[in-house]
Image: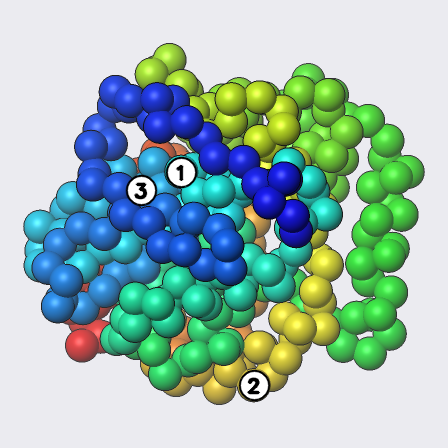
Amino acid sequence: MSQETILRTPDSRFEGLPDYDFQPNYMEITGLRIHYVDEGPKDAAPILLMHGEPSWSYLYRKMIPPLANEGFRVIAPDLFGFGKSDKSSRTSDYSHTRHVNVVHEFVRGLDIRDITLFCQDWGGLIGLRVVGEEPQRFSRIIAANTGLPSARGLRAIFGYPLFKMRIRRLGKVTQEQLQEHSNLMRWVAFSKTVSELPIGPILQMATMSNLSSDVIRAYEAPFPDESYKAAARIMPYLVPSELSKNRKVWDNVLSKWEKPFLTAFSDRDPITRGGERYFQKMIPGAKGQEHVTIRGAGHFLQEDKGEDLSKIILNFISQSE
């Protein structure tokens, strides 16, 4: 990855965003400037909020204050390619492993322990892999509208090539077709082939709330033009790209995870709906937990029900200490 391909969104794009007046923090990781929100006492137990795509830490603006007000250290990083973090103009600079490595270095750089992880969308694919790297740093996990697809043997070898073949056969998917019937395959084909990726409409399509023009502007702020959207465009295509590596995390860590594990999936997400059952079945720490279904929320349930999620996180921590 050359410095010529690295882009940094101008700070002016982030001025005056509603309900997002948090102090910016930055960490240099492998030549990249990574932005993160860090609220609450620095010596308190940390809650790590991991976003997916094409969102950024703005997604957690409703959750950060109530969690910090209860005395926790609330940390919400922007993934490489999103928010106020550096971006690359080339899709080839992004991979599942690179995201895992950056977030792992971020966690190690802050040297946080006793972590409560809340992860949604790609925040789960990345966050759960980081748990696999250093499970001792994490005390409990809350998974929301996410997954960690895995396979072994021939399925691990041929799964991703077959997935890419199916995407090629789908060809171009229009925004109207996506709105009419949304699923993972259509979403991948749309994001990869559409000439201009419509960030604001994507967020609106995947939430039940009516987003104001100012909120839409906030989600579009990280992307002045299409060259900044390489990560947002390619990440859906990468979902099943590392099935074997994900399987190792399941085999070595998650299938043996005795610490508390909670699912908080929404009822109106066509992409991940039902995925909570696999977590509940496969993870020992999920047994006996009061798993939650968030009613009336779409894929970006933090946007629809952020305050409710904060209460769920706080209750889960108090019951599992």
Q: Quadrant of the C terminus?
A: bottom left
Rendered residue at 37%/71% (across/down): 108
* Residue behind mark 3: 60
Instruction: Name which residue type carries label 2.
Output: Asn
Residue 252's label in the rendered image is: 2
Using the numbered discs, state the Cα–Cα distance from disc 1 to disc 3 in whole angstroms: 14 Å
Q: Earlier in the sequence, mark 1 or mark 3?
A: 3
Secondary element type, mark 3: helix
Percent across and percent down for residue 62 are 24, 38
Asked whether residue 253 is in view, the answer is yes
Comparing labels 1 and 2, the label whose residue is closer to the camera: 1
Rendered residue at 41%/27% (across/down): 10
Asked whether residue 311 is in view, the answer is no
From what the image shows, is residue 138 above or below residue 182?
below
Image quarter for residue 20?
top left
Rendered residue at 60%/83% (across/down): 251
* Residue behind mark 1: 84
Toward the viewer: 173 or 135? 135
Q: Residues within 10 Å of mark 1 (few under 14, many from 20)?
A: many
